Amino acid sequence: MDWIKDGGITSPLDFIASGINAGIKSDKKKDLALVTTSQPAAAAGMITKNRVQANTCVITAEHLKSGKARAFFINSDNANCATGPKGLAETRSLVSVLAGKLKIPPAEILPASTGVIGVPLPVDKIEASLDRLIAARSVEGGGRSAEAIMTTDTYAKEAALSFEINDTAVKIGAMAKGVGMIEPNMATMLVFLTSDIAISAPLLEKALRGAVDSSFHRLTVDGDTSTNDMALILANGAANNPLIDKADDDYRVFSRNLTVICQKLARMIVKDGEGATKFITITVNNAQNMAEADKIARKVANSNLVKTALFGEDANWGRVLMALGNAGVELDPTRLSIAFGSICVFENGEPVIPLPEGPLGDLLKKPEIDINISLGVGEASNWIWTSDLSYEYVRINADYRS
C-alpha cells in the first residue's frame, strides 16, 4: 500500500470533480461540489441514525437501494433539513434537473448537504449554477470539491492510496468534512470515497460497514449525532481487476485498505475538531466484553469535565473515574486502574501517591494523549478517539449562525 501524494477523490481512474461558489455562502467561498464517473458504479453508503434527517439523506438512502450510482452532489452552508414537504420536493426537483443535464437517471445521483438546520435551500441559486458546476469538472478539480464541502473545517480533508490486487493497480480516493456535532452514528461528518476497483455492490457495502465501524464509529468530539451524516462510496471497476464477488483474499485486501484510508480521515476530523488542541485516545482494557468497554470509553470521551481538564493540561484522574462510574456498567472499584500514557495514577482502586507531577505535566502538554483504563474483570477491550473542549469550541458554536 502506498499513499498518493496530494491525492484525493479523483485519484482513482475515471473520476472527475468540481467545486464552485453558487451563492449559498455569502463570502464567495466554494459551497457546491460535484464528483462523477462516466459509467454506473457499484454504490454503498451509511447514513445518520438521527431520527430527524436532512432531505438529502432521505433521497440518498432511496437511491442507494439500487446498489449503483455515478455522482456525488454536495452543498455546504445549508443542512437542507427540517424544511418540510416543500423542501424535500424542491431537493428532488433539483436532483432531477442535474440528472437531466448529466444525461443520467436521477437515482444515480447521491446528494448530500451540510450547514445550518431549518433554512430553506436556495434552490434557484444552485440550479442557476449547475451548468458552471458541470463544466468545471476535471481530475484536478478534486481539491476544489473538497474545499466546497467545508463548513467550520480549518482545512480540506483529502487522502488517496494505491495497492495491488492480482498484479492490478487499484486506487481509493477520499474527501471528508467534519469538526463539530461529532458522535458515532456517524459524526457531523460527510465522507465520500471513490475507487476504480471492480467489486459487487453487496461486498462494497460490507467492506464500507467494516471500515466505518473501525474508524468513524470510533470517534466523538461533543456527543451530538448530526442530522446530515453519511459515508458514501462509488467503485467504478475502471482498474479492470477480476470482479470481486465473494469474500476472498482480494476482498480482504480491499477491505483492509479501505479501513486504513477511513482511519486516516477519522483522525483528521478529530484533530480538526472545533477548537481542539488535543487528540485523545481512550482505551478500556480487561472488560467483561467489548460492548461494556465501548460504553465506558464513550462515556469518558464525552465527559465535558474530562475534556476541559485535558484542555487545561490537568491530570485530574478523578474526573475519568467519575465518568466511567456513570457508564451504567457493573464494576468492581477495587480492580480499577487508570493511566495517562504509561503513567499510572490510580491502581487497583487506590490513588498513586505521590503523583509524578513533572512527567504528567510533560505528557499532557503533548498534542496526542492516551488514557488507559483497566476494569480488571475480563479480557475484552475497546477504544475511541476524541478531542478536548476549549474556549474556541464555545465561541465557534455560539456564533455558528452569525
Image (cartoon, rainbow, N blue to C red):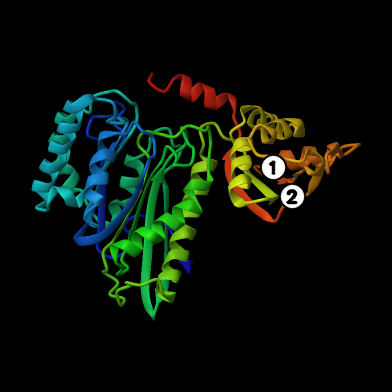
Marks 1 and 2: CB-CB under 8 Å? no
Task: Determine the residue located farthest toward the right in the rendered image.
Answer: 354
Q: Residue at x 38, y 40 (%)?
A: 48
Closer to the camera: disc 1 or disc 2? 2
Q: Find residue 308 and report its image quarter.
A: top right
Task: Determine the residue located farthest toward the front in the rendered image.
Answer: 330
Pinpoint residue 44: horizontal percent, then vertical percent.
31, 55
Disc 1 is placed on an element classified as loop
Disc 2 is placed on an element classified as loop
Query: Residue under circle 1?
Result: 366
Q: Residue at x 47, y 65 (%)?
A: 256
Q: Earlier in the sequence, mark 1 or mark 2?
A: 1
| Callout 2 crowding tier (Cα within 10 Å): few <14, some 14–19, many ≥20 | some
Identify which amino acid the numbered label 1 is placed on: Lys
Taking the image as shown, residue 196 lies to the left or right of residue 247, namely: left
Q: Is residue 315 visible?
A: no
Pinpoint residue 383: horizontal percent, then vertical percent.
61, 48
Q: Is residue 340 visible?
A: yes
Taking the image as shown, residue 283 lies to the left or right of residue 127, namely: right
| 297 or 7, nearer to the observer | 297
**Split into 4 quadrants, where in the image is the C terminus?**
top left
Q: Residue at x 61, y 36 (%)?
A: 299
What mark, if any, has residue 51 been given in the picture? none
Pinpoint residue 278: horizontal percent, then vertical percent.
62, 39
Query: Residue under circle 2?
Result: 377
